Amino acid sequence: MKLLILVLNKVEKLDRLLKEFASQHISGATIINTTGMAQKLMHNDELNIIGSFRHLIDPKRGENKTIFMVIKEEKLSQIIEIIESIVGSLDEPDTGILFTTPIDFIRGYKQ
């Protein structure tokens, strides 16, 4: 088992992404609103230390959506394919960040 974490920058793609997960019988996602450090620093005059990096950040985006999913390892490539078919390559800037971590204990998980 793995914990998949997707920080989705393209929040307008969230509904479509969740619908595609459901159509592929992938369920159990938890979604929270998150804000990146650079976004927070950019909007705080007292902490604005990023100056010349301001052009790298989309000023219209205030939040990301972070999706947590407990998955079986064999589902990982399918999930990556779904994500990138909807949001684009995660290798492109301002798309999102995806990573997994092993789960060594779980209780209350129903699949």
Image (cartoon, rainbow, N blue to C red):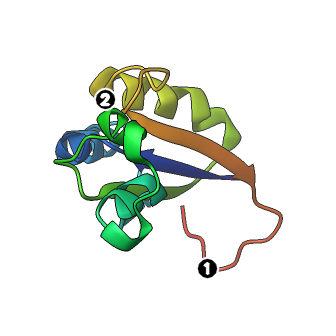
- Residue 28 x, y percent position in the rendering: 44, 61
Task: Name which of mark 1 and mark 2 comes first in the sequence.
Answer: 2
Location of residue 60 with respect to 36 vertically, above or below: above
Location of residue 84 with respect to 70 vertically, above or below: above
Q: Give the residue at mark 2.
A: 87
* Quarter of the rendering occupied by the C terminus: bottom right
Which circle, 1 or 2, is nearer the viewer? 2
- Residue 64 x, y percent position in the rendering: 33, 54
Q: Are marks 1 and 2 in contact (CB under 8 Å)?
A: no
- Residue 32 x, y percent position in the rendering: 37, 67
Location of residue 33 with respect to 88 vertically, above or below: below
Count residues near mark 2 (Cα–Cα under 10 Å), then give few for <14, some for 14-19, many for 20+.
many
Three-letter amino acid code at disc 1?
Answer: Gly
Q: Quadrant of residue 31?
A: bottom left
Count residues near mark 1 (Cα–Cα under 10 Å), then give few for <14, some for 14-19, many for 20+.
few
Q: Is residue 68 left or right of residue 32?
A: right
Tag shown at residue 108: 1
**Nearest the camera: 25 or 31?**
31
Q: Residue at x 44, y 49 (%)?
A: 50
Location of residue 107 with respect to 32 vertically, above or below: below
Q: Is residue 15 left or right of residue 36?
A: left
SS of the residue at dot 1?
A: loop
- Residue 1 x, y percent position in the rendering: 72, 52
**Nearest the camera: 44 or 73?**
44
Tag shown at residue 49: none
Q: Quadrant of residue 58?
A: top left
* One can see residue 68 in this view: yes
Q: Is residue 60 left or right of residue 52?
A: left
**Nearest the camera: 49 or 12?**
49
